[in-house]
């Protein structure tokens, strides 16, 4: 089944949410009943210790500090990637989705607590009709780095230039295959790899750099494309990053055997293009990066959340399109900030809320543990 790129643009009727009602195990290990599509309420959230609140920073009980906020501005997408979103996924009613004003306010409060980087994500953020307004609002009220991740299917020079003028600093583009048949099979869309490659060229031309490219290799789908994807890094002088397939698919079909490890991918790339570690990765970075030993431009990055978790250096917090804060990508509890946003809360109440949620961050995601529970909501709802 394939989707026309225009089919799911935000204009048009909104489908009702039919996410299964789920019980969540909260970050403190207790069970908390959650409402459909909404997280646990602020009243259920334990307060962080007074000295942590007074510190005015988002610090967790394991000593990590939040510097990076990922905001999903829409849960809609024009792709249905096999590892992410099933064709029949249903979206939040529009009234449950944060408004541009709410997004901008959360960005401002997060910056006041030390956030240095905001990544706009989704769903597909470029589907949002008020994207330029969101970027310019964040730029007008903060001095954070503003990055955005997109599937690259709907980019034009005009749009990119408008987003850049509004304050966008850089882009990441996802591309899982350079073969048209594969690309169609993985994304279940009518978009071609050439469309996305044209988007990559436009980002470079607009100076939305350093540009990163993301790929997820899934065994039996595109696991033989590591080298072809690595060639994109050399061709455009950008960083091609391979992300291990994580148990965050809406089909709940993830199985370790379908995941291509970072190590396996590195060996495949190195069989053709020897790599040398850059040894320049930031301590909080998700990727381990390598340059081409032959001196060609571009970098290769490996993100190994499953085979080599980097939770110990995590500096990230996530805000979902429907106004829930997730302490971790793999959290089974989300904390609803919407209630505060729409209930007249002050900025300092929002700040305390973010500090309290951060305090609940677990030490790690425990994917390897037999007790691991896959979160009910997929990556597309959480914001990658
Ligand atoms: N639509 C945008 C895009 O395509 O990049 C932004 C949202 S997408 C959810 C963000 C990133 O999450 C993409 O690079 C995608 O490949 C990645 N992703 C989605 N589901 C994943 C999964 N189960 N495991 C690993 N990465 C995943």
Image (cartoon, grey):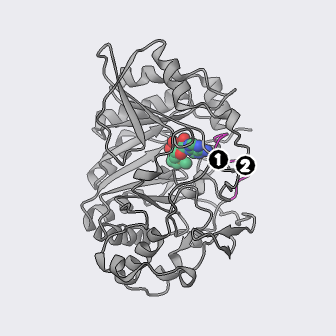
Residue at image position (31%, 17%) is 296
Say which residue label 2 marks: 252
Q: Could you tell me if residue 291 is visible in this image? A: yes
Does label 1 point to a residue whose CB lies under 8 Å from ligand 1? yes
The boundaries of the magenta stretch are 81-90
The label on residue 229 is: none
The label on residue 247 is: 1
Residue 113, how many percent across, how many down? Answer: 31, 70
| Residue 160 image-quadrant placement | top left
Residue 95, how many percent across, how many down? Answer: 58, 73
Lower position in the chain sequence, tag 2 or tag 1: 1
| Element assignment for label 1 | loop
In magenta segment, residue 154: no
Overall secondary structure of the magenta section: loop
**Mark pair 2, 1: CA separation:** 7 Å
Image: 222 above or below 372: above
């Amino acid at each position: 089944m394939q989707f026309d790129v225009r089919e799911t643009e935000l204009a048009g009727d909104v489908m009702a949410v039919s996410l299964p009602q789920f019980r969540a195990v909260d970050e403190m290990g207790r069970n908390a009943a959650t409402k459909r599509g909404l997280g646990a309420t602020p009243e259920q959230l334990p307060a962080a210790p007074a000295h942590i609140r007074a510190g005015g920073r988002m610090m967790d009980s394991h000593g990590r500090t939040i510097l990076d906020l990922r905001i999903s501005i829409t849960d809609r997408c024009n792709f249905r990637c096999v590892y992410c979103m099933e064709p029949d996924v249903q979206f939040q009613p529009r009234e449950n989705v944060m408004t541009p004003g709410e997004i901008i306010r959360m960005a401002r409060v997060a910056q006041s607590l030390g956030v240095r980087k905001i990544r706009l994500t989704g769903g597909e953020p470029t589907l949002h009709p008020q994207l330029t307004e969101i970027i310019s609002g964040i730029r007008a009220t903060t001095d954070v780095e503003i990055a955005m991740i997109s599937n690259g299917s709907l980019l034009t020079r005009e749009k990119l230039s408008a987003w850049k003028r509004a304050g966008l600093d850089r882009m990441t583009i996802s591309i899982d295959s350079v073969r048209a048949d594969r690309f169609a099979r993985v994304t279940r869309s009518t978009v071609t790899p050439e469309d996305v490659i044209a988007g990559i060229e436009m980002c470079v031309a607009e100076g939305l750099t350093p540009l990163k490219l993301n790929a997820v290799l899934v065994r039996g789908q595109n696991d033989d494309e590591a080298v072809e994807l690595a060639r994109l890094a050399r061709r455009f002088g950008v960083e091609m990053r391979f992300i291990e397939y994580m148990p965050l698919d809406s089909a709940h079909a993830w199985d370790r055997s379908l995941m291509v490890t970072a190590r396996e991918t590195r060996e495949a790339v190195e069989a053709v293009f020897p790599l040398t570690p850059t040894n320049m990765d930031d301590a909080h970075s998700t990727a381990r990066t390598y340059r081409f030993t032959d001196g060609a431009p571009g970098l290769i990055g490996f993100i190994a959340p499953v085979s080599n978790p980097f939770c110990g250096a995590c500096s990230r917090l996530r805000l979902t399109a429907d106004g829930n804060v997730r302490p971790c990508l793999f959290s089974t509890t989300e904390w609803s900030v919407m209630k505060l946003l729409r209930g007249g809360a002050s900025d300092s109440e929002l700040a305390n809320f973010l500090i309290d949620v951060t305090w609940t961050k677990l030490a790690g995601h425990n994917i390897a543990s037999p007790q691991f529970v896959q979160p009910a909501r997929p990556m597309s709802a959480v914001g990658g």
